Image (cartoon, helix red, strand yellow):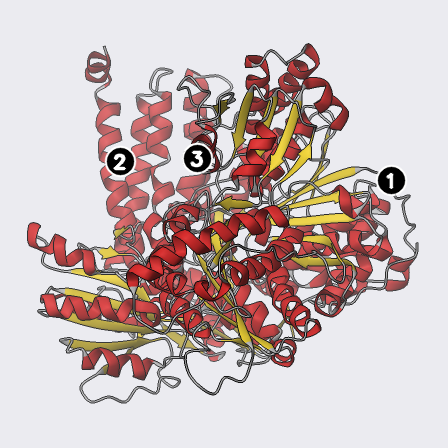
Amino acid sequence: MALREVSLKDRYERSSGTLFLSGTQALVRLLLTQRERDRKAGLNTAGFVSGYRGSPLGGFDMELWKCRDILKEASVVFEPGVNEDLAATAVWGTQQIDSLPGKNVDGVFALWYGKGPGVDRSGDPFKHGNYAGTTEQGGVLVVFGDDHPGKSSTVAHQSEQALAANSMPVLYPSNVQEIIEYGLHGWALSRHSGLWVGLKTVNETVETTATVEVAEGAPRIVTPNSAADGADIRPQPDYSPQRDETVVMRLRLPRVHEYARANHLDVRTLGHSGARLGIVTSGKAHADLVDGLALLGIDAERADALGLSVYKVGLIWPMEPTGLEAFAEGCQELLFIEEKRAFLEDQAAKILYNRPARPRLAGKTDGAGGVLLPADVQLDPLTVATALVERLEACGLADDQLRQALAEATRVEAVTVPPDRPKRIPYFCSGCPHNTSTQVPEGSFAMSGIGCHSMAMWMNRDTLKPVQMGAEGANWIGLSHFTTMRHVFQNMGDGTYSHSGLMAIRAAVLAGVNITYKILANDAVAMTGGQPVEGALTTEQIVRQVLAEDVARVVVVTDDLERTTVDVAGVEVVKRDQLLRVQKELSQVAGTTVLVYEQVCAAEKRRRRKRKLMPDPAARVFINEDVCEGCGDCSVQSNCMSILPKETAFGRKRRIDQSSCNKDFSCVEGFCPSFVVVEGGRLRRDSGKLDRSRLAAIPDVPVAEFDNCNVLITGVGGTGVVTIGSVLAMAANLVGKGASSYNMTGLAQKGGAVFSHLRLTSSPDGLRGSQIGSGTADLVLGCDLVTAAGADGLKACSPAKTKALLGAQPAPTAAFQSNRDYRIDDKALIAAVRMACDEAIAVDAEEVSERLLGDKIGANMFMVGYAYQKGWLPLASEAIIKAIELNGAAVQLNLDAFALGRLAVVEPNAVRPDIEVSGIPDTLEGIIAHRSAHLTRFQNMRWARRYKALVDKVRLAEQRVAPGSERLAQAAAINLARLMSYKDEYEVARLYVDSAWKARLARTFEGQERLSLWLAPPLLARIDKETGRPKKMKFGPWIFHAMAVLSKLRFLRGTRLDPFGYSRERQQERDLIRSYEADLETLISSLTEANLDLAVEVASVPDAIRGFGPVKQKAIETAAAARARLMSRFASPIVEEEVAA
């Protein structure tokens, strides 16, 4: 198959043809196109861009930086704003070019960008700048990003009302192509009218990548003749606020309607005049309408038959009346389909109110007061289709065919998801500084702010919701007067500090409130892609600035004392293990204090290491699962998502996900001797399986013809799911198909749920909305099973056509961090997807990728290869391969993963790794035999016989009262063995001498040069004054020789010669064995069928006794309370029955 010649440079260098652009890239092309149009018109203009990042415009500044050379050549200046309102003021300055002598260009076309909150805070400069006006050869385009559902914002936003309040016209594109077209119209309109012009973007437009058609001279722009004197609308040198407002209202705004009419910004897109039901829509809602019409089977012919017509509004304020009036002529009703609060509908009501024959209006309500299209949630095609059918019924235009189509679509939508189904919520990245920095002392409270650290809100960290950006802590100025609490902590990112946060600190100082600002200096704005903080403030600069504001005390806490360069008199600099002490001290200081927590963002650290911009420690952490108790203290100490559960014969343990680990090493602070530091080792790849000649010989599959193909890709943020959608969309572009890839991420890049909506059409002009609607997915690539089996994933599926390829082993969710025993029922999730689909297959993609490629990140592309070879992905293999190469990221790994996925279909055994045999016993006999052998190795055969004798007694007693039941015996077999094989010094040493863990280590790493352990020996470890816990120390390779000797001395265990046996912990462990044995004797002596369940509960109590030292001590105390409560119930069954009655 011949592929189109495509280069990534095309998006900015080609003047005509089919391009593949993201909405963000379209904005960059817009700047270049405006400059070129001006050049051809003989104008010497320049461009200016300023604003502040934020979803859905979070990556715009990064794209501008990438294109700095081509922008410089085009005389476009990018000056990032410290914040949005200062950026708006800078933009205003470009239109003052005629006010001073010495101008070196004819005019400046300027662009401001920001998200909804930025619009809110910039109202003052917007109004001032707009009233001042624009130059004839300049113009201002205000590109605002609205997060309608509030996925990446503290509040949901709809900003067109704010712009209208400042008399700024607003254009609203519905797709990527219109971003360019409407943007060019925006500057032309700004020049013609003298007004600043808004360009509304939403996630579904600016975060979509799609094929677009461009042509020289398109769009054609008509500058209308105006009755108003052009000179009067330009910026005036004299000061006259009343005159400025008069110019806006009487001269500039009328020119907006002139321009809209001359350039046909509002158009009829479906149907003809004389329709009985007219639909008025714009922007994203228009795309939803187009998909809604498709759901109902309404094409142009059917629309005419039904008496239906569609009017697409490009200029949403001020709405042009002449075109609307002409469209409404003869209509029985106008239905306004728009997201959020009514905007077009309210304007239309005013326009049409005095007409002698006016149509009925419906939209947010049905005309009788009932809710039709909600104003508080996003619209989707099915919601739109449902409202449309309702209004067609009201107009007497609906038929059975229409009703049947809606019934079918609604049936697919009716997917119920159990409330206890796991959810994938955003979380701190592995190694994120906020894992540590957002902790507060017991009894204290913190207030969150804008940034990744706000996720502490939904962790167990006593953290309140945030206020608006830059006001962090100012709410305490009011609240502090009316509470008995004397102090709070306030989290603030260094980005927010630079943006506007310093003012809040000043306010707190002036108010004299007791507050500690924790300024989280992470060296990057991670939430929007890792941009540098404006001004690149150093920690020392922050320290000196807050000292100049007269704060009471400043302390710097850092993860690396050697890297920290702070040298300011009176400012203490300490390691992060002193955080708790420092916070306690600062909470007692009167007035405003500052704690600067310095540690590089984990995601940025990973990026820099990949680019060789930062040293990558030649060390990794490995957990010896034989020593691990599964207590979860490592998760408590590190809060790290790279700590995963590992199911073993001895129950659930822990392992490190080497693919996602960012080498923060805070997990080794878990009070457990199972942590091994591997220095100099590399992750092992089973490269012998990668016979590339064999991979190259895999036969291609026929590529199916299609009109439309919808692929929903689900995954976890940060694992490359967005890349998969982009690669496949580019592959479609290479073969001349239409494609769009829309990524619903929100905060998901932080380990939350990610959806990539890939829509393919037979030709570029066939693209509709960017989001896959209910029941319209042809393929679900469930790279994350949890996300695929959630409500949004299942909603896209149809039992009639959807194929699903699922990752069989889902990564743990955030719930695992707070519940060490939390389990995801993967079988139930797979079954749920199978129920919703025509066919579903689950594959161990991560296992294959990690073992054969050395990195789980290849799992997603493995699944692409599998889907392709199954014939479920209608794209040519050479197009996918070329798209991988064009993408340029981890090219060889992705090519290998794609090929392995294909091979898995053709020869399943060829890629199936030699998975470690678990050896997990699942019968009572198997458990007893396994534990008896283990106890023999722990001590001796006599010790094992003691164990078996008691378990056999329990089993016989259970059979007498409940023949066939083994629940009590199994609980006893597991928990008695647990207590009898307590991990003292001898046992830990024996487990390190054992060869099993070394074999696992060898399967994970190759070339390791040095091993060391993190331990807290009772006689050597110092006690931490703040936590009361012994502090761990690092022991080099010599410790393994010492352990070899120690393991041979286990015959001393429990004797008078045992030097460790006199400790309180060892005495407790021996007491627990005797107590548990006595409990079992008590249980079996009084066992009945009625109290069997309670007996099982008692016998299972020791399962909670896990860990070492203080962790185990706390567990023992908790278990003792539970045992006493349960034994009391067991001893008094009559009382319990009476209470129950």
Q: Amino acid type of disc 1?
A: Ala
Residue 20 appears in the picture as rendered: yes
Assign a secondary structure to mark 2: helix
**Does 267 appear above or below 672?**
above
Indicate which disc, 1 or 2, sits on the residue closer to the N terminus: 1
The residue that appears at 88% across and 58% down in the rendered structure is 3
**Tag 3: amino acid:** Ala
Q: Give the residue pinned by disc 2.
A: 1123
Q: Residue at x 37, y 21 (%)?
A: 1092
State the image coordinates of residue 983 (x, y, percent, origin top left).
40, 57
Numbered mark located on residue 604 in the image: none
Element assignment for label 3: loop
Residue at numbered disc 3: 342
Which residue is located at x 18 percent, y 77 percent? 549
Looking at the rendered image, the disc whose residue lies closer to the viewer, 2 or 3, is: 3
Front residue of 1071/627: it is 627
Q: What residue is disc 1 on?
A: 704
Instruction: List x then y, in percent, for residue 729.
Output: 73, 52
* Residue 1117, position as x, y percentages in the image: 24, 46
User: Is residue 1048 visible from the viewing direction of this image?
Assistant: no
Q: Is residue 1037 left or right of residue 516?
A: right
Q: Report the Cα–Cα distance between label 1 and label 3.
A: 43 Å
- For marks 1 and 3, give the one nearer the viewer: 3
